[in-house]
Amino acid sequence: MGATVSSSDPPAGPAAPNFVDASAGDARPGFAAGAAEPRDPASRRKAFAEQELRLISALVVILGAGLFLALPFVLSIGSVVFLPVVTAIVLMIILSPLADKLARWGLPNVFASLVALLSFFAIMLLALALILQPAVDLYDRVPAMANQAAERFGELRDQFAWIAIANEELAQLTGQSSGREVVLASPSVIEQLAFATPSVVLETLLTLLMTFFMIEARVRMRKHLLFDRTSFGTSIKAARAIREMQDRVAAYIFTVAWINGIVGVIVAGGAWAMGVEAPVMWGGLAALLNFIPYIGPLVMTALLALFGIGTAETALLGVVPALAYLGLHAVEANIVTPSILGARFTMNPVMILIALSYFSWVWGVFGALLSVPILLMLTAFFDNVGRPNLIGFIFGEPLFATNLLDLAEESPPVRS
């Protein structure tokens, strides 16, 4: 007899696929409505970890943006504390190679650190003396030069007197009258220096002391950063980041210092050949202001133009030194410096201007001088750690190019 098939048994054939009701939705985390549930527990954990990582990345981006916006106010209010600390860190990075070389020559670490710091301080004092001494000698002639410059600008104003007449007629038509203005007397330069000297001296001493102790403790700091890590890969990455920051900042500062020194010598020689007074002062100013990208050369050009107009017989002759310096700067900035520094120190001009305006707003002139070294330090740090992919993160990509979960699995722990 043949076997009978019960009507309750399912028909033979391939199993019907299990569809998820899209209208009901899926309340379980990590799965969209209408999507099939992965049966592998490892796939579930990976999907949940990716969503958790993206949430943490979003929080990091929000906190980073808030820190970027709030940091200038904190640094500006606490400039008495933060400016010496940041300056000491930059000086420590710059002077550590010199201290290491002196230590390799047999000098004790304490004396090597002290000699490196005193050498830098002596060079700065010499540069300031070369600039300030001629400036003090020319201080008595400033009123006469200002009057002559005012006469030159007065001649230009007379040529465009019709603009002032038109403004007066327009004011009369609109019923606006030039009332009496109250002008508050501002403190003199001597009074400003008297009030600022104690604070400047205190910050300078604090910066020098912090720089000395940081240079002296550089070996212990390196050992702490390298050997107190939990994985060998982290130690290697920390060592590369430290070396890259130190090499990049120190090489940039020393190379630019040599270039600016040569520019200062050329400017001093040109000023002497043109008969400009105090050529050493102008050379020192050119070398110092050239450390500030874009803004420094513009200030130097304006100073030369005003000084030339105030001392030359005609305004046309007065602007010749400024035009000569502008041509020298064009050659130096577009040909000499890029060919010497190369692609290693090539930075986005927009980032330089952002850093310059950011730190100038926070710390003034000192912030402008520190802006490029700080930018180099941050660039070297992110080159070794990984730059955040902010634009790609908005469109669903990971915040960092490397997967942090895979990196944590690949890094073996350090064995003691």
Image: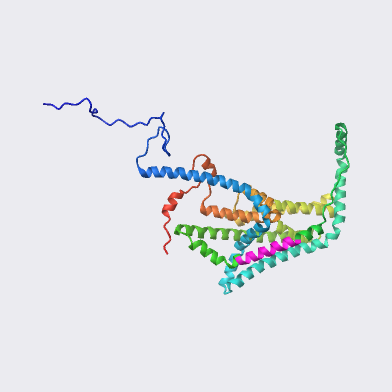
The quarter of the picture where the C terminus appears is bottom left
Residue 101 against residue 322 in the figure, above or below: below
Magenta segment, prevailing SS (helix, strand or loop): helix
- Residue 234, image x and y in percent? 47, 57
Asked whether 243 or 395 is in front, the reply is 395
Membership of 200 in magenta stretch: yes
Residue at left 43%, top 43%?
48
Horizontal arrangement in the rendering, residue 292 relative to residue 216 (left or right): right
Q: Is residue 234 visible?
A: yes
Q: Give the x, y percent position of residue 323.
A: 76, 51
Asked if one can make out residue 280 in the rendered structure from this viewpoint, the answer is: no
How many numbered badges does the structure rendering display?
Answer: 0
**Is 401 a magenta residue?**
no
**Camera-side residue: 95 or 361?**
361
Residue 166, given in percent of the width and then of the height, sits at: 86, 35
Residue 106: quadrant of the picture: bottom right
Query: Given the current orientation, which residue lies at the most extreme top position?
Result: 7
Residue at 60 percent across and 58 percent down: it is 249
Seen from the viewer's position, the closer of residues 1 and 351 is 1
The quarter of the displayed image where residue 370 is located: bottom right
Q: Name the quarter where the N terminus is drawn.
A: top left
Instruction: Tell me where residue 215 sits by quadrant.
Output: bottom right
Q: How is the image coloured?
A: rainbow
Residue range highlighted in magenta: 197-213
Q: Position of residue 324 (x, y in %)?
A: 75, 53
Task: State the residue at coordinates (60%, 48%).
Answer: 67
Relative vertical location of residue 380 with respect to residue 39 in this rendering, above or below: below
